[in-house]
Image (cartoon, rainbow, N blue to C red):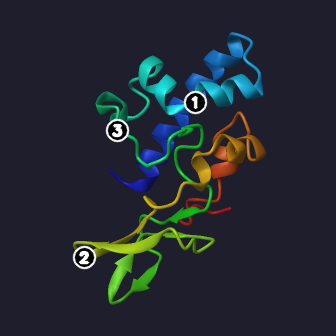
Amino acid sequence: MTYRSWFDRHALKHEQVVKGLLGKGYSKEEIIEYFDFDNMADKEPDFCPLYAEKKKCHDLESLNCFLCACPYFRFNDEGIDMYEEKPRYSTCSINSSKGQSKAFGEKVHQDCSGCVVPHKASYVSKNYHEDWMVPMGSCDMGEET
């Protein structure tokens, strides 16, 4: 699966969940709360493959899944640049000290597993938009703006 195909599929899943909650009259705060890992794993088991195992992507007691990915994550399915003589396909636009570039075979990708920035409810609240693509729109470096 390419980054772009995951990105597009996730945007649709996110849209469906948010539309359903808005249809029930949920407020911004209630929507953010709904996206708590434990609640989502229980009520939206198909939203994330990790929910079936009750396995969190980050070691964070109160993990919020509203953004899922990070607005600072950048990807290009065609490649961004060369990193230590291997093509890099993703990176962090703020060079977080909690992230790192990591080789997976002959390709380099951003490893964000040590960073929890987008998974805190306070961060989500500050960057909230019902349309997931608004905060995430700059992630695909291969898309023309």
Give the camera-side residue of 58 and 135.
58
Q: Amino acid at mark 1?
A: Phe
Note whether 143 is above or below 129 in the view shown: below
Residue 3 in picture, x, y percent from top left: 42, 55
Pick out the residue farthest to the top: 24
Q: In terms of secondary structure, where does tag 2 sit? A: loop
Q: Nearer the viewer, mark 2 or mark 1?
A: 1
| Residue assigned mark 3 | 55
Residue 45 in picture, x, y percent from top left: 39, 23
Q: Nearer the viewer, mark 1 or mark 3?
A: 3
Q: Nearer the viewer, mark 2 or mark 3?
A: 3
Label 2 and label 1: CA atoms lie apart by 35 Å
Pick out the residue farthest to the bottom: 85
Q: Are discs 2 and 1 less than 8 Å apart at CB?
A: no
Q: Are discs 2 and 3 less than 8 Å apart at CB?
A: no
Of the 4 image quadrants, the one containing the C terminus is: bottom right
| Residue assigned mark 1 | 35
Residue 82 in picture, x, y percent from top left: 40, 85
Label 2 and label 3: CA atoms lie apart by 28 Å
Query: Which of pointers 1 and 3 lies earlier in the amino acid sequence?
Result: 1
Residue at 43% in and 58% down: 113
Q: In terms of secondary structure, where does tag 1 sit? A: loop
Query: Which of pointers 2 and 3 lies earlier in the amino acid sequence?
Result: 3
Give the camera-side residue of 129 and 140.
129
Q: Residues within 10 Å of mark 3 (few under 14, many from 20)?
A: few
Q: In terms of secondary structure, where does tag 3 sit? A: loop
Residue 93 horizontal side relative to residue 59, left or right: right
Query: Which of pointers 2 and 1 lies earlier in the amino acid sequence?
Result: 1
Residue at 70% in and 18% down: 22
Where on the picture, by quarter, is residue 46?
A: top left
